[in-house]
Image (cartoon, rainbow, N blue to C red):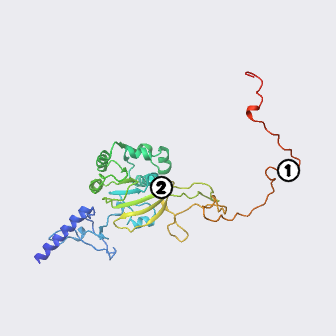
Amino acid sequence: MATSAVARETVFALRRQIAKIEGTLPERLEAPASSSFDADVPRQSLTPSRHPTPARNLTIVRRGLAVAPPDAFLRTGAERLDAALSGGLPKAAVSEFHGAATRDAGAVAGFALSLVSLILSQGPRLPVLWIGTSEVFREAGFPYARGLHAFFGIEPEQLLFSEAPGLLDALWIAEEAARMTALAAVILEIRGSPQRLDLTATRRLHARAQSAGRPLFLLRQAGEPEPTAAPVRLILSAAPAATRKTLAGPLAGSIGRPAFTVAIGKSRTALPGKFTLEWNPDERIFEERRGEQGRSQEWTPERPKNPIPVVSASRRREDPAAASGAVLAFPAVGSPAAGDQSPRPERPAHRRPRRAGRGA
């Protein structure tokens, strides 16, 4: 009995050490008062102890992770995406947002600002710090001040910027800012895949965010997916905007709400998935764009059908058949129509008489 207890304690200690390294160390949660909790949810205490742990100190584990309270996640409003992320994006953690190319920097920044708007609407309106290198701001620019209030409800003075000369300075600023509770969130924007942004650096950022209970959004411009300590990685790109909806129907030729294509690249609790979200600037919430059968739909603009080819066929191929149309009669080139006179022959320029005046 003593040997089995020591072995069990050793296993628990190893599990706890592995969870600490992976950043999935569960917290002690009080067991529910009623027994109406899901019966299939295993209950396990990962804290080694020789004595039986009281029921109120048991840790509830689901899918291998500790179940956090509902307010530990930031819900986007898109039900299927929140369900895929097991409740939404974690508030006290590093969340990684990737743009495959530099042209996706606007979509990544817009998605991050939408999340900041959700955070400010649910809690105290604290300032937000946006950190980036000179290269990042030179390539992607800064958010438009008027658009911050109109689309996201963020006052310009609430968004603070810190431009660092290099990556090391940006990481140092992010680590110091991540531990501050006077900030609602911290945004760190990095371009490419620098070697110094490795697993160790992101673990430090993740630990600071967890201790402060604040989110840290890591924006990656044209970066390759690499191992990081972020529990969630989303791949973002811009989606075509739909037309504006009016009482009379869709307004042709108009541009509707901002739209994003969101793909789950990495998550400890979710399977890979792809969603098309629209940001509602009036309600300040995301809405999923769905098709007729309720599935997530990537909207594509309708183009008018034109049977006439824009360019001719390539060589060694038959020319496409000419489109039928009205046949009009035109006079042949070089043969004047009836009643027209032939043009007078024009003399060469060097034989023309000079105009009267100076130098004549």
Is 193 on the left or on the right of 246, as rendered? left
Q: Can you see residue 225?
A: yes
Q: State the residue lying farthest toward the top.
A: 358
Where in the figure is residue 156, as x and y percent of width and height?
Answer: 44, 43
Question: Camera-side residue: 34 or 106?
Answer: 106
Q: Would you call the spot at circle 1 few (<14 residues within 10 Å), some (14-19), or many (20 or more)? A: few
Amino acid beneath label 2: Arg
**Disc 1 or 2, which lies upstream in sequence?**
2
Where in the figure is residue 283, as x and y percent of width and height?
Answer: 50, 56
Q: What SS does tag 2 mark?
A: loop
Q: State the residue lying farthest toward the right.
A: 339
Question: Camera-side residue: 191 or 126?
Answer: 191
Question: Camera-side residue: 333 or 215?
Answer: 333
Q: Quadrant of the C terminus?
A: top right
Going 31% across and 67% down the picture, which residue do you hit? 67
Going 84% across and 44% down the picture, which residue do you hit? 342
Where in the figure is residue 14, as x and y percent of width and height?
Answer: 19, 67
Q: What SS does tag 1 mark?
A: loop
Q: Quadrant of the N terminus?
A: bottom left
Q: Would you call the spot at circle 2 few (<14 residues within 10 Å), some (14-19), or many (20 or more)? A: some
Amino acid beneath label 1: Ala
Q: How many marks?
A: 2
Q: Which mark is residue 337?
A: 1
Where in the figure is residue 160, as x and y percent of width and height?
Answer: 39, 44
Q: Can you see residue 32?
A: no
- Quadrant hosting residue 25: bottom left
Going 38% across and 53% down the picture, which residue do you hit? 219
Q: CA distance from mark 1 to mark 2?
A: 69 Å
- Quadrant hosting residue 299: bottom right
Up the image or down, 238 lies above or below 136; here it is below
Is 59 on the left or on the right of 313, as rendered? left
Which residue position holds label 2?
284
